[in-house]
Image (tube, rainbow, N blue to C red):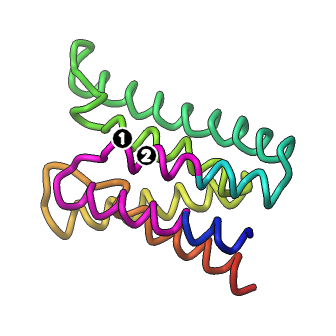
Amino acid sequence: MITLTLLMTMLTAVALGVSDFRSRYVSLFSLIAYALSAVFYGCLAYGVRQALTYAAVGSSISLLIFVSICVYFRIREGIDSVVIDVKIGKGDLYFFILSTFIFEPFSLIVFYVASGVSGLIYYYLKQSDSIPLISVSVPFVIIYILSKVLL
């Protein structure tokens, strides 16, 4: 059952990544499917109480990171600058918060660092105005899921 849930989580993550890469848009249906599979996996793998604890800790870390990014852009570009949906998409925020159900807290931090570094590499290689953050993060979700299935 856990393997099936991990497979569903992986497939919905890929759907989110492809959509984000192609159009910089994430559908509500894909987010709901990812949410259901991630929450279901977390509850099966860790137990409901532990999954909620991991999600609370991970969401706190996620929000701290996103607030820090918002403060940075507000300082850099002025207090009136719009950050959400201009610099950071709502879908990115939802994706990272939902991913907290999949990762244990330490693994989540490693995931964020790897995603951030890959986002910067994408930005510098493509000389793009934006980074498809979900798209560059999905490979790390898949690697983590495969490591759970295969190990």
Which residue is nearer to you in this view: 37 or 13? 37
Crowd rating for badge 1 (residues with CA inside 10 Å; few <14, some 14–19, many 20+): few
- Residue segment shown in magenta: 9-36
Q: Quadrant of the C terminus?
A: bottom right
What count of labels does the image hold? 2
Q: What residue is disc 1 on?
A: 28
Amino acid carrying mark 1 in the image: Leu
Q: Against 120, is 32 above or below?
A: above
Lateral position of residue 106 relative to residue 88, left or right: right
Q: Which mark is residue 4?
A: none
Lateral position of residue 102 relative to residue 98, left or right: right
Q: Secondary structure at mark 2?
A: helix
Lateral position of residue 91 relative to residue 128, left or right: right
Instruction: Give the dominant element type of the magenta stretch: helix, strand or loop.
Output: helix
Lateral position of residue 63 relative to residue 11, left or right: right
Tell me what residue is drawn at x 62 percent, y 37 percent: 59
Image spot of residue 110 (x, y percent): 61, 61
Quadrant in the rendering for residue 139: bottom left
Image spot of residue 138 (x, y percent): 44, 65
Q: Which mark is residue 31?
A: 2
Tell me what residue is drawn at x 72 percent, y 53 percent: 42
Which residue is nearer to you in this view: 50 or 86? 50
Quadrant in the rendering for residue 37: bottom right
Which residue is nearer to you in this view: 75 or 61? 61
Tell me what residue is drawn at x 34 percent, y 61 percent: 17
Image spot of residue 22 (x, y percent): 18, 60
Tell me what residue is drawn at x 34 percent, y 54 percent: 133
C-beta proximity under 8 Å, tags 1 and 2: yes
Q: Against 41, is 50 above or below?
A: above
Crowd rating for badge 2 (residues with CA inside 10 Å; few <14, some 14–19, many 20+): some
Quadrant in the rendering for residue 2: bottom right
